[in-house]
Image: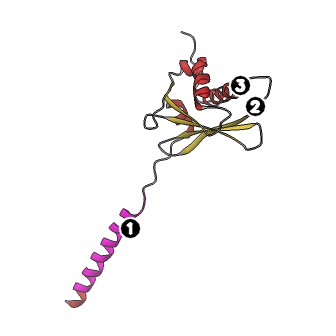
């Protein structure tokens, strides 16, 4: 009888340990395919960590692009509402700017690119908007004219 009680108690402890283990482990957010994220995105938030190009300049450049309008994308300032976050950075002591497109739900980088500033030529904000559109076009073709 004692042996049976001890076995039952041991089994109950192991069962409790299994429950505790499950509760302690953080649940990883589901990963999404970058193509799906870029295809379904509607709200875009722009952040710039550079004093040489502002987020507002990139926003304006995005809003001027035909593809951006045709895809039904909208610039937002709400992180909660954003489907994509575009982060712009500049490598110190260079003319190189990089951007990362992040899925805020999973914090995964779904696209990225880089560009250089030039004295006579396109503004960096226009180049970033163009490169962003080119990355999205791969998964979300430009809608045909209706």
Residue in view at x 79 percent, y 29 percent: 118
The verdict on residue 10 being magenta is yes
Query: What label sits on residue 120 in the rendered view?
Result: none
Neighbour tally class for label 3: few under 14, some 14-19, many 20 plus, Cα within 10 Å: some
- Dot placed on the residue nearer the N-terminal end, 1 or 2: 1
Q: Residue furthest left?
A: 1
Q: Is residue 62 above or below residue 78?
A: above
Q: Residue at left 58%, top 43%?
A: 109
Query: Regarding mark 1 in the picture, which secondary structure is present there?
Result: helix
Q: Which quadrant of the rendered structure holds the N terminus?
A: bottom left
What range of the chain is rendered magenta?
Answer: 5-27
Disc 1 versus disc 3: distance between alpha carbons?
A: 54 Å
* C-alpha distance separating marks 3 and 2: 7 Å
In percent of the image, x 62 and y 23: which residue is there?
Answer: 61
Q: Which residue is at the far bottom?
A: 2
Q: Residues within 10 Å of mark 2 (few under 14, many from 20)?
A: some
Which picture quadrant has residue 65? Answer: top right
Question: What residue did someone put label 1 on?
Answer: 21
Tell me the chief SS of the magenta region: helix
Against 48, residue 140 (above or below) is: above
Q: Which residue is mark 2?
A: 117
Residue located beneath label 3 in the image: 123
Mark 1 vs mark 2: give the one in front: 2
> Residue 46's spot in the image, x, y percent?
56, 33
Residue 10 appears left or right of 60 = left
Q: Which structural element holds mark 3?
A: loop
Please state the horizontal and vertical placement of residue 50, each as a whole percent of the image: 65, 38
Task: Name the one closer to the observer, 96 or 32.
Answer: 96
Q: Earlier in the sequence, mark 3 or mark 2?
A: 2
Q: Where residue 19 appears, x then y in whole percent?
A: 33, 67
């Amino acid at each position: 009888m004692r042996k049976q009680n001890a076995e039952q108690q041991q089994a109950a402890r192991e069962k409790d340990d299994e429950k505790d283990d499950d509760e302690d482990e953080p649940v990883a957010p589901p990963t999404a395919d970058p193509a799906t994220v870029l295809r379904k995105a509607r709200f875009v938030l722009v952040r710039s960590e550079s004093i040489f190009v502002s987020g507002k300049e990139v926003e304006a450049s995005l809003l001027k692009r035909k593809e951006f309008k045709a895809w039904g994308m909208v610039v937002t300032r709400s992180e909660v509402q954003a489907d994509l976050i575009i982060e712009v950075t500049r490598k110190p002591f260079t003319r190189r700017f990089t951007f990362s497109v992040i899925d805020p739900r999973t914090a995964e980088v779904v696209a990225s690119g880089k560009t250089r500033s030039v004295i006579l030529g396109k503004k960096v904000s226009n180049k970033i908007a163009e490169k962003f559109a080119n990355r999205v076009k791969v998964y979300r073709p430009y809608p045909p004219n209706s």
